Amino acid sequence: MITNIFTGAERGFLGGNLKKQTRGINIDYGNILQYNYNSCNNLFHFAGPSDDFDFHNSEKVVDTIVNGTINMVRLAQQSNAKLIFASTKGVELPENIYCYSKLLMEKYIQDNYDDWVILRIPRVYGKTRNKGLMKKLRLNMVSDNDMCKKIEYITLDSFINQTLKVVNQRNIIYNYNNTRVNTIREIKDLYT
């Protein structure tokens, strides 16, 4: 039986929904800043800050992404497991400490491990999303002027389907396709 370890799935939107669609025995890792050995076949590393509300403490962002990922690379090495790393499309044109930290860890994984898939995830929306733009919409924190701005994203179903198709590949950086473009107002109508 295949054993999958998930970080960030217990409370996370992407990892939690992906975990529901993954075959095998699924185990939640817990705090990635504390190293605990667990044997597995696949390590889905999705833990980390995920929206503007989390990014205010840049020291914590760097600590979580860098030290947490180093721990997960170590676990993958000791288990001889495939490491599936949730990065961000934002590494293509990094603008903040989150994107720079993810880019740094992409390079670290490539230089220090030999069985990985790096997922450059764009914005993903679905009705159960409760962070980022969706949180701002629910709290009425988006101005009327911004409601006409267009956003590129993929749906949750598209994210799951595309991810499941590539997790068994080896040493690839995957860029998602089938993106949609809607105004923030349209996204609000579709997903809140």
Image: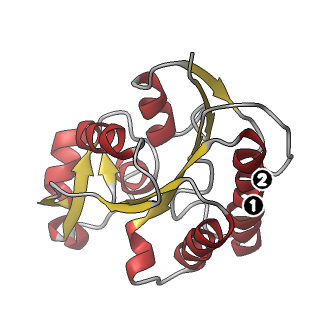
How many marks the image carries: the answer is 2
**Quadrant of residue 70 in the image?**
bottom right
Q: Position of residue 125 (x, y in %)?
A: 30, 46
Give the position of the C terminus as an image quadrant. Answer: top left
Q: Position of residue 43 (x, y in %)?
A: 61, 40
- Secondary structure at badge 1 equals helix
Give the position of the N terminus as an image quadrant. Answer: top right
Q: Position of residue 37 (x, y in %)?
A: 84, 37
Q: Is residue 64 left or right of residue 130?
A: right
Q: Looking at the image, is 188 positioned above or below residue 164? A: below
Q: Position of residue 34 (x, y in %)?
A: 86, 46
Say which of 173 and 1 sits in front.
1
Q: Comparing marks 2 and 1, which lies closer to the viewer?
A: 2
**Quadrant of residue 181 in the image?**
bottom left
Hey, what amino acid is under mark 2? Arg
Cβ–Cβ under 8 Å for marks 2 and 1: yes
The span from disc 2 to disc 1 (Cα, nearest Å) is: 6 Å
| Residue ID at (16%, 44%) | 189
- Secondary structure at badge 2 equals helix
Say which of 30 and 112 sits in front.
112
Disc ID at residue 152? none
Q: Is residue 161 left or right of residue 50?
A: left
Disc ID at residue 74? 2
Q: Looking at the image, is 103 positioned above or below residue 36? A: below
Hey, what amino acid is under mark 1? Ile
Residue topped by disc 1: 70
